[in-house]
Amino acid sequence: MKIFIGADHRGFELKDKIEAYLAKRNYPVEDVGALQYDKDDDSSKYAALAALAVIGSDDKDPRGILICRSGNGMAMAANRFNGIRAAVATTPEIAGLARTDNDSNILCLSSELFGDNDNWQPIVDIWLDTKASRKARFIRRNKQLDNLS
């Protein structure tokens, strides 16, 4: 599983922490930006870069992690791309459901909630370790999501 990670200025520091954590767990990680802190950058740019990287990846299970102030801006932008199912998770339980029920391929996190603590670690761990359900109803619903755009 290759992970594409991105953040705007509000998630820049947390992105670096998560990237180091993933590398320590031996995940291949590609940073799609921001590569330098810029207080005037926009989350949609990095959401698009991550979404396109996930869609275009040759990896059999590519994923993305995006960070902005609330996580919502990243999710809204990433979900504009066909085949992306970006989910904002604030608890490990929600992260697990995003994977099992929705086969989420991009996790969006809030730097407002997690920038000053390590409470994001169990969320990332559950999201990475949880397999998508192969139940027909979830497969059908996720195909419907993919075909909306």
Image (spheres, rainbow, N blue to C red):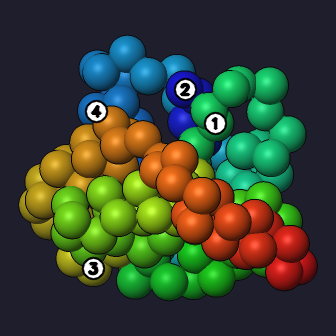
Q: Is residue 14 left or right of residue 52?
A: left
Q: Is residue 146 left or right of residue 139?
A: right
User: Is tag 2's residue or tag 3's residue first in the polypeptide sequence?
Assistant: 2
Q: Amino acid at mark 2?
A: Met
Distance between the alpha carbons at the discs numbered 1 and 3: 26 Å
Q: Residue at x 17, y 50 (%)?
A: 122
Indicate whether 18 appears above or below 89.
above
Q: Which residue is mark 4?
A: 21
Q: Residue furthest front?
A: 136
Q: Sort mark 4 into few (<14), some (14-19) or many (20+) by Cα contacts within 10 Å.
A: some
User: Is tag 4's residue or tag 1's residue first in the polypeptide sequence?
Assistant: 4
Q: Sort mark 3 into few (<14), some (14-19) or many (20+) by Cα contacts within 10 Å.
A: some
Camera-nearest label, 4 or 1 = 1
Q: Amino acid at mark 4?
A: Tyr
Image position, residue 144 (x, y; %)? 76, 74
Q: Which residue is mark 3?
A: 112
Image position, residue 3 (x, y; %)? 55, 36
User: Is tag 4's residue or tag 3's residue first in the polypeptide sequence?
Assistant: 4
Decide if residue 83 is in sight here: yes
Decide if residue 104 is in sight here: no
Q: Secondary structure at mark 2?
A: loop
Q: Residue at x 54, y 26 (%)?
A: 1
Q: Sort mark 1 into few (<14), some (14-19) or many (20+) by Cα contacts within 10 Å.
A: some
Q: Which residue is mark 1?
A: 62
Q: Is residue 77 left or right of residue 137?
A: right
Q: Secondary structure at mark 1?
A: loop
Circles 4, 3 touching at the beta carbon (< 8 Å): no
Camera-nearest label, 2 or 3 = 2
Q: Which quadrant of the structure image shows residue 84?
A: bottom right
Q: Amino acid at mark 1?
A: Pro
Q: Which residue is mark 2?
A: 1
Image position, residue 32 (x, y; %)? 66, 45
